[in-house]
Image (cartoon, rainbow, N blue to C red):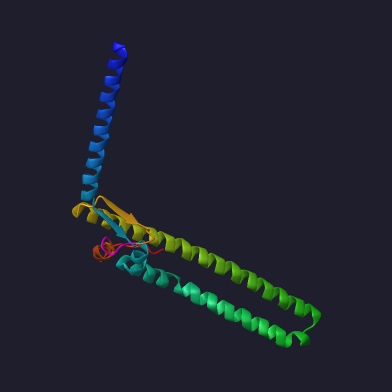
Amino acid sequence: MREVNLLNKMTRKNIVHLLLGALLTVSALQVQAVDTRIAAVNSDRILRESVPAKEAQKKLEQEFSKRGRDLQQMEQRLKSMADSLADKGAKLTPVNLEKKQRELAQFDIDLQRKKREFQEDLNRRRNEDLIAVLDSANRAIKQIAETEHYDLIIQEAVYINPRIDITDKVLKALEHVNTKVDLR
C-alpha cells in the first residue's frame, strides 16, 4: 500500500511538472510569436513592374522582332499564293494545278514549323529571363529580410494585407540591380 501511495505521489508530481512545462512552453511561444516579423511580396507585380523585368521584355522584343516580321511576311505570301491558286486554278492544267497545290501545302508546312520553332525559342528565352529576374528579386528580398530583421517573407499568397506587403521596397531595390540578360 505504501508503494502505491508513493507511486501516486510521483505520478501526480510528474503530471504537475508536465503541465507546468507545457504552460511555460505555450507562454514562451506566445511571447515569441509577438516578436515575429512577417512580410509578403507579390511576385506577379515584380515580374510586371520591376526594372529588370521591363529590360528583359525590351530585349526579348528586340531579339525576336525580326523573326516575327519574317513570319508575318511568310503568312502574307501564303495567303497571296492561296488566293492566286483559287483565282487561276480553274485555268491551270491538272498537272500544274497539282504542282501548285503541293507547293502551297509545302510552304504551309514550312511556315507552321517556323512558327512553332519561333514560339519555342521565344518561350525558352522568356523563361530564362524570368528566372534571372526572380533570382535578382530573391536576392533583394533576402537583403531586405536581413537588414530589416524579418523572420518570414512569403511569396505567392492569395491575399496580402497592405500592412505587411513589402513589394514596393523590393521594386525599389531592384531599380538599382544590374541584370545583364545575355542576348543570343
Residue 172 position within the rendered picture, expressed as x and y whole percent measured from the top left: 24, 66
Please name the residue shown 22% across and 50% down the image: 34
Please name the residue shown 27% across and 60% down the image: 164
Query: Is 9 above or below relative to 182?
Result: above
Residue 123 position within the rendered picture, expressed as x and y whole percent measured from the top left: 47, 63
Determine the residue located farthest toward the right in the rendered image. Answer: 94
Tell me where the magenta segment starts and ends, as one range: 160-164
Residue 98 position within the rendered picture, expressed as x and y whole percent measured from the top left: 76, 76
- Residue nearest the viewer, comparing 50 with 74: 50
Please name the residue shown 34% across and 61% down the image: 133
Query: Is 139 above or below relative to 162?
Result: above
Relative to 67, is 140 on the left or the right? left
Relative to 42, is 109 on the left or the right? right
Look at the image and say whether residue 146 sits in the magenta stretch.
Answer: no
Q: Quadrant of the N terminus?
A: top left
- Residue nearest the viewer, comparing 53 with 47: 47
